[in-house]
Image (tube, rainbow, N blue to C red):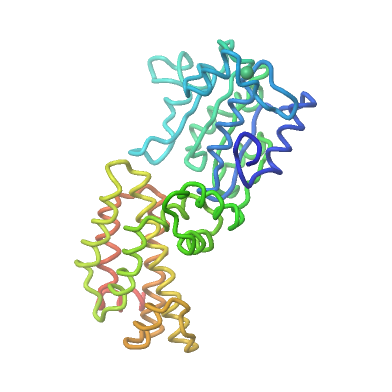
Amino acid sequence: MGWLGIEGHDQVARAFATAADHGRVSGSYLLVGPAGVGKSTFAMALARALVCPRPRPGLEPCGACASCVQAAAGSHPDIDVVEKPEDRATIPLEALIGETAHRMREGLCWRILLAPTVGARKVAIIRDADHLSVEAANCLLKTLEEPPAGAVILLVGTALERQLPTIRSRCQIIRFRPLPADVVGRVLAREHAESGDANAIHAAAAAAGGSLARARLLLDPEVAAFRSRLVELLGRRPVRGVDLAREAIALVEAAGKEAPPRRARLRVVLEAAVDFFRAALRHAVSGETPADPITARILTSTPCEPERAEAALRVTIDALSAVDRNANLMILVDAWTAVLEEPRLETASRA
Ligand SMILES: [Zn+2]
């Protein structure tokens, strides 16, 4: 276990601990790195440590003061979290500076100016910084430039390129790397201590690209079963878009009503489809046999022309990027599966 129970980000943790020990904590940080590696978890742990008035060396919160007790209960009045609502494409302006009628009398930029209640300082976490509109970012600039004494603002985003230059230039950049597969495997093994299948855990950790969130999903039996099924559906000639859509939507809907797990499932489906069409393209171009036995069997019995594989790959990559743009998932699945049907895909490949 690393600092505050966080694994895989020791270097980042040490940088913050050293800064705190030397009284050099900055006012604004931009935490960037791939999805699912634990940036938000880290930001929350960091916030809890930063608000403790009596931290031990190495930025270890004391765990006993009123601030630590409230932080542990998840209800610290001095830790402010703002994120993009599920039904919005960007972080609303009101979340930062309040409704029109109450401009700068509510919202994160106003709250951070208030004196801390029980903590040593105010800490604001802005998740989904990838989705800051130019307007919202402009409202943040002054706060980022001159944060109130002691206050810390943590912005959390994926790629640095997705952040507005005005934001980037005002924050200290902290980079998070994909988690090593052995760390992912260790965490999964701990989570499945009772019922874990060591081989499945190892495979999920290896295929997750350093994302714990993705590894958890790959290990989900329902998702794992669908990935095999998907290869069958994609390998059919012709592809039956309606069947594919129905089964994909059923898998997404089984994740419940919340949008993030639904989106995560669809992402896994589309990523698996990307893998399939990449394998199909390589198979068509160079005769390479796919490593996955089901994919190998299907492509050997019903090979895919290179143009078709390439067009299918392109429309699937487009669909994958639309998942992150907050598109309506059901419409997205319908559109993607319809294009995969032969005649339309021919058109797409000529376009
Ligand atoms: Zn404390």
Residue beneath the point at 41% across and 31% down? 92
Q: Nearer the viewer, residue 67 or 122?
A: 67
- Quadrant containing the C terminus is bottom left
What percent of the width, then of the height, locates residue 311? 38, 75
Q: Furthest residue to the front? A: 194
- Quadrant containing the N terminus is top right
Image-quadrant location for residue 65: top right
Q: Classify residue 72 as left or right of residue 297.
A: right
Residue beneath the point at 44% across and 70% down? 275
What percent of the width, then of the height, locates residue 163? 57, 43
User: In the rendered image of this protein, does residue 153 appear above or below residue 261?
Assistant: above
For ligand 1, which image quadrant applies?
top right
Q: Furthest residue to the right? A: 22
Image-quadrant location for residue 297: bottom left
Q: Nearer the viewer, residue 232 or 306?
A: 232
What percent of the width, then of the height, locates residue 193? 47, 49
User: In the rendered image of this protein, does residue 90 appear above or below residue 22?
Assistant: below
Q: Nearer the viewer, residue 163 or 175?
A: 175
What percent of the width, then of the height, locates residue 24? 76, 27
User: In the rendered image of this protein, does residue 178 appear above or below residue 202?
Assistant: above
